[in-house]
Image (cartoon, rainbow, N blue to C red):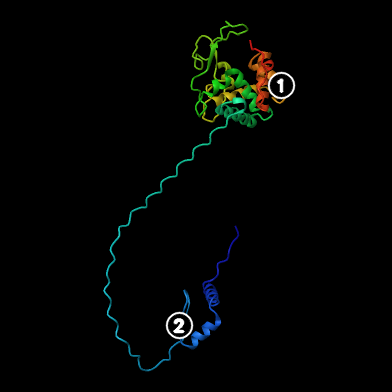
């Protein structure tokens, strides 16, 4: 910021007199002076002086002072009342996603895309790919059964991984039942069905509350994206994306279903039954 020079007092007064004099028409000043009148301006007075005489002028008797009647006192409030706060505007409702994706799930999937765009931009994962996993694993948390913060109304917990189903691996308990309530076998948890041991590696806080919770839509979606993008995955490439989805579930039928729903969400066209082979 530049410096400014302050004018001296005498110069400032002279300038103000010149400025004010310029506001009065010259003819008016001349006529008034000739008649001995007085011109009153806010900060300037011009008058014709009376001639001096030896005898003092006779003074008129001073008028009697008028009685001063005090005005009635008015109470002054100690402070002014604060205006009532304006009511807070209601938040805009979340939009629903294509092909019936519930609004809260749609928001969580898009949030996961933004999180990974910042943390792992080379992966290039889209929200549609995350939504494909959410659709196949839990039908979008059983139709969006979650509160406004993304917490599931009822936890989603899978069957025990005890090898009782064809092709099912046996996975003994790894978390003391902390996430799945089972102290014997592990179970997949949350809307995108993470095994507790995998969640321990990839669980991500997707909503910024300081907690990674597999039963929260935002955390689950961000964790799914983080897992798929691990190991230098390029989700823009079909071969690289297929390998990443196979890590999630080692089944080509599973890959076909996730890919079909991902494409459906990007085009707005439902996949055909031929695109959705049964997952064994």
Residue drawn at 67 percent across, 25 percent down: 269
From the image, state whether disc 2 or disc 1 is nearer to you: 2
- Closer-to-camera residue (204/274): 274
Q: Which residue is mark 2?
A: 38
What x and y, as percent, mark residue 23?
Answer: 54, 76
Q: Quarter holding the N terminus? A: bottom right
- Closer-to-camera residue (7/122): 122
Q: Quadrant of residue 19?
A: bottom right
What x and y, as percent, mark residue 241?
Answer: 69, 21
Q: Quadrant of residue 263?
A: top right
Residue drawn at 28 percent across, 63 percent down: 72
- Closer-to-camera residue (68/264): 264
Q: Residues within 10 Å of mark 1 (few under 14, many from 20)?
A: some
Q: Secondary structure at mark 1?
A: helix
What x and y, as percent, mark residue 76?
Answer: 32, 57
Is residue 205 among the parts visible in the rendering?
Answer: no
Q: Which residue is mark 1?
A: 240
Q: Residues within 10 Å of mark 2 (few under 14, many from 20)?
A: few
The label shown at residue 280 is none
**Looking at the image, is mark 2 or mark 1 earlier in the sequence?**
2
- Examine the rendered structure and indicate whether residue 52 appears above or below residue 234: below
Spatial separation of the CA atoms under disc 2 and disc 1:
97 Å
Is residue 5 among the parts visible in the rendering?
Answer: yes
């Amino acid at each position: 910021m530049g410096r400014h020079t302050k004018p001296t007092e005498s110069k400032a007064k002279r300038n103000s007199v010149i400025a004010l004099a310029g506001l009065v028409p010259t003819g008016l000043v001349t006529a008034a002076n000739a008649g001995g009148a007085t011109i009153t301006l806010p900060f300037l007075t011009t008058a014709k002086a009376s001639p001096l005489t030896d005898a003092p002028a006779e003074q008129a008797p001073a008028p009697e002072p008028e009685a001063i009647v005090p005005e009635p006192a008015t109470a002054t409030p100690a402070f002014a009342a604060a205006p009532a706060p304006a009511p807070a505007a209601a938040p805009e409702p979340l939009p629903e996603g294509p092909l019936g994706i519930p609004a809260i799930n749609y928001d969580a999937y898009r949030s996961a895309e933004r999180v990974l765009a910042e943390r792992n931009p080379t992966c290039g994962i889209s929200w549609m790919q995350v939504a494909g996993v959410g659709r196949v694993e839990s039908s979008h948390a059983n139709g969006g059964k979650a509160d406004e913060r993304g917490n599931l109304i009822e936890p989603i917990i899978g069957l025990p991984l005890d090898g009782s189903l064809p092709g099912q691996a046996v996975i003994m308990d790894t978390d003391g039942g902390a996430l799945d309530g089972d102290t014997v076998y592990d179970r997949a948890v949350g809307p995108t069905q993470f095994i507790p041991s995998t969640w321990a590696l990839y669980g991500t806080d997707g909503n910024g509350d300081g907690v990674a919770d597999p039963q929260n839509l935002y955390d689950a979606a961000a964790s799914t994206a983080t897992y798929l993008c691990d190991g230098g995955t390029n989700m823009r490439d079909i071969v690289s994306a297929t390998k990443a989805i196979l890590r999630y579930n080692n089944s080509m039928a599973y890959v076909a279903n996730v890919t079909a729903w991902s494409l459906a969400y990007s085009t707005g066209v439902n996949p055909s039954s031929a695109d959705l082979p049964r997952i064994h």
